[in-house]
Image (cartoon, helix red, strand yellow):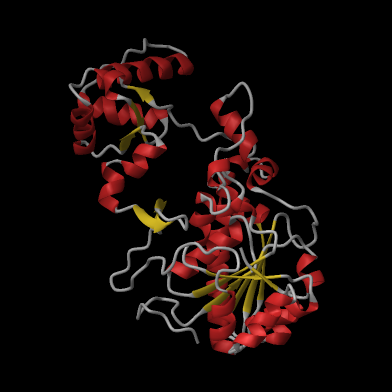
Amino acid sequence: MPVSSRPGAPFDDVRVLDFSQVLAGPYAGRLFAELGADVIKVEAPGGDLTRAIAPKRDRGQSGLYTWANLGKRNVCIDLQRPEGRALALELVRRSQVVIENFRPGVAARLGIDWQAVHASNPRAVMVSVSGFGSDSPIGAFAPTLHAATGLIEYQARKAAAPRMVNLPDASADVTTALHAMIGILAALRGAERTGVGEHLELAMYDAVLASYSETPFELLDPPELREEPPPYDAGRNSPLVVAGPPQHVWAELSRAFGIADPAPAGAELAEKARLRHEALERWMAAQPSLEALLQRLEEAEIPCAPVVSLREALEGPRGRRRGLLVEVDDRRGGTRRATRLPYRFSRSEVRARRPAPRRGEHNAEVLRDVLGLDESRIVAYGAAGVLLAE
């Protein structure tokens, strides 16, 4: 078993072999790495795409690649070669978890599918992440998943937007990564009891829709949009969000602060809602400061928050108090900031043991430490083009 330099880390006795690239698989691997596992990223000779999904000045060892691959070791193996496939399966024999997100059918062509993994190591568990399931050859990225799962359309419909726009994030990948982690943990628990590992097939399409909180409202007959008030224009006190449907928000605020109802008797519902929203905005704007406004709302136990930028959330007082950002080696002679994982255990330490690796950086180290190969064998693999490095 791998030995951790952090005694008591939750997964310091687990080795993960990560064949995945981009985000869904790699981020699941990062979770394992920072929770103590020895995660070995097996990178293709062409490199992980996230190295290039970045501004030109950041390509190669990009911020996105760093974010998804902190804490891992890296070997670059050409799986197109029979020797490379054999080497990969040797690593499988000494691992407890295998992650892959090739298009359906590719892992089998490379000789590292579930059949090969299970034959090499019957106790290992494996997760195969795909866009739409193992019976669909279609590849997928977050924007196409957001379209196919209805998230883009739903967002536009709920906002009454004049045109549809893509979601500004990779939530499909991150949601899938979290489900991959949960599935792997369940499979590991089963392997502990039975001595036999199993294969988890995880489609991003399924993961997104299984996790989307608005599906209960969409499945009503007819569908209903869960109504929420837009942010309140509080003037100098900044845009402010109060949680809850408009009727509830009006009832709570008007009762707590004695705000008179501006809606005339018999007014249409839409007109009544507009007038009440504007009355609340005037009351918010009349408060002497944002701090005073927030204090009054908090004392009345009304959940609220000012609208801030992503940068402010990361760097502002709340982010600093939570210790959200950490400095990591940028592999270019300096450091860069990254968000830390959210887990705060009472005893176990959660952090990246090493920076995000260069392609093939740990070829010799992994083959020596994990497989016990001598230097001549390692050099021979490099000379034959089976092992590559930057």
Looking at the rendered structure, the number of numbered marks drawn on it comes to 0
Residue 57 in sight from this viewpoint: yes
Residue 374 placement: quadrant: bottom right
- Residue 222 on image: x %, y %: 64, 35
Query: Is the C terminus in the top left, top right, bottom left or bottom right quadrant?
Result: bottom right
For the residue pair 379 and 281, the one nearer the viewer reads as 379
Residue 95 in sight from this viewpoint: no
- Residue 109 on image: x %, y %: 82, 70
Horizontally, residue 181 falls left or right of residue 355, namely right
**Vertical relation: 237 (above or below) 303:** above
For the residue pair 15 and 157, the one nearer the viewer reads as 15
Horizontally, residue 46 falls left or right of residue 3, namely right
**Vertical relation: 265 (above or below) 35:** above
Residue drawn at the location 35% of the way across and 55% of the way down: 326
Horizontally, residue 152 falls left or right of residue 134, namely left
- Residue 343 on image: x %, y %: 37, 62
Residue 344 placement: quadrant: bottom left
- Residue 107 on image: x %, y %: 76, 69
For the residue pair 199 and 87, the one nearer the viewer reads as 87
**Vertical relation: 251 (above or below) 324:** above
Residue drawn at the location 47% of the way across and 58% of the way down: 331
For the residue pair 84 and 219, the one nearer the viewer reads as 84
Horizontally, residue 315 falls left or right of residue 74, namely left
